[in-house]
Amino acid sequence: MNTPMSDSVGGATLKEAPSTFNLVMSVVLLAVLPALVYYMWIAATQYDGALPLPTTKEEWLRLWSHVPAPTWTAVGIFAGWYAFQGLLQIYAPGPWVDGSQLADGSRLKYKMNGWFSWWFTWAAIAALVFRKGVSLEAIKDAGEFVYAQFGPVLTTIQIFTFLFALYLYFYGKWKPAGERQTGYAMYDYWLGTALNPRIGNFDLKLFCEARPGLISWVAINLFLAAKQYQLHGMITTPMILVCVFHFWYIADYYYHEEAILTTWDIRHENFGWMLCWGDLVWVPFTYTLQAFYLLNHTHDLPGWATAGIVALNFAGYYIFRSVNIQKHRFRTNPEGLIWGKKPEYIRTARGTLLLTSGWWGVARHLNYLGDLMMGLAWCLPTGFDHPLPYFYITYFTILLVHREMRDNKMCAKRYGADWDAYTAKVKWRILPGIY
């Protein structure tokens, strides 16, 4: 995070001006990322998972002719889904908890009802699918319907996120007190102009991060499994593995939902197009690529491969979850025992505590290693015929390494000599012995 400057624009805190590279990249990514999602979906559905490389105008036109327009049915699905999840966020039972301390010393309250909402959603989906009775035909029909509407829904949500991000941009302009802005309109649209935009007690960032996108990711997977059954009369072992791994990952997220309040996104990132589009488009429409690929690639796996992939996934899950929970518990109770001992830490000149024991004494971001192990396990069931289903692990590796580098740079600037002492004690960044 850049250090705020003393100047202000319209009463808003003005961050350091972004570099020319960052300004250009924000504009480029606004155009490229939505097109990339379409490209990968088209590759999965129209080119059997192969990556089309057009060389003529006609080939380009043929490729992009598959981009669907929104339909009234898609608009209805979108509106109904988001309204349903919004009502659950507001009315579903769950405790109110305090978030992390803000710069002004205050703490926002968040309603933690994700676990209830997760299971209530599945009950509602089951009731809708089996409204005429429990049958295999109902499962097939549901899979066919969702598959047919996937493209129009994707376009509908793409349009919505651009409009919603415009609202988020003006939200920070209308309520500028204490918010972090750069004064560059396009860059502020990209990153957002407010840290915690809210309508009353309804936190827009938490809702988008934790509700419609995450649950629809898993729902799309399961409907694609139903579509595979409709097409081929079976659901393959690779499809089952992908669906189970993703279902487990998100169910675990909701079980430990309170831990999101100490994450980087909630504590530090403004809420603009980048996070909004990432939550609502990128997650549900690219994290389902493995299931889309497996729809018509009905290969099986030998027992040893299945066992190895399962072991990799749950070993990664154990590292990921235990590391994150350890950090969350330390932040909420710095004197709580870690591995049966009092925690070791460095107290910085700023008053912040840098944990140097437990998992956090092994590497600075061992949770990233667990995340990457799970990501690889999600891709391996697809086999090795095409690179498309390995997009997730490729992108996620780049993302986490870049995030670690950005975090290291920010912390070095923030903590100075204290950070030098910390990195001398905790040498490894993500992978002990290698990086």
Image: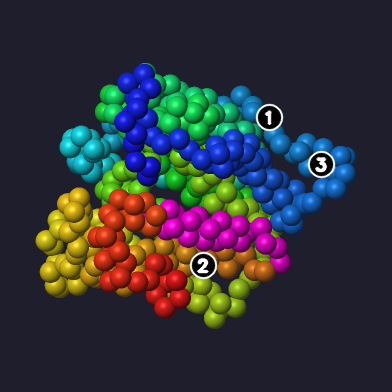
Report which quarter residue 381 is drawn in.
bottom right
Tell me the residue at 27%/65% (across/down): 422
Instruction: From the top left corner, tell me how far across and down residue 247 is, in percent.
Output: 44, 55
Mark seen at residue 165 = none
Tell me the residue at 34%/34% (across/down): 5
218 relative to 60, above or below = below
Instruction: Give the residue type that dot 3 points to.
Output: Trp
Q: Which residue is mark 2?
A: 377
Report which quarter residue 120 is drawn in.
top left
Instruction: From the top left corner, tell me how far across and down residue 403 is, in percent.
Output: 44, 54
Instruction: From the top left corner, tell me how far across and down residue 65 is, in percent.
Output: 78, 36
Tell me, yes or no, whether the two marked residues, 3 and 1, touch with CB atoms within 8 Å.
no
188 relative to 248, above or below = above
Instruction: Give the residue type that dot 1 points to.
Output: Ala
Q: Earlier in the sequence, mark 2 or mark 1?
A: 1
Magenta segment boundaries in residue numbering:
385-407
Label 2, residues with CA under 10 Å away: few <14, some 14-19, many ≥20: many
Q: CA distance from mark 3 to mark 2?
A: 34 Å
Q: How is the image coloured?
A: rainbow
Tell me the residue at 59%/35% (across/down): 27
Tell me the residue at 20%/34% (across/down): 104
Q: Which residue is mark 3?
A: 60
Label 3, residues with CA under 10 Å away: few <14, some 14-19, many ≥20: few
Q: Which residue is mark 1?
A: 69
Q: Give the camera-side residue of 259 and 216.
A: 259
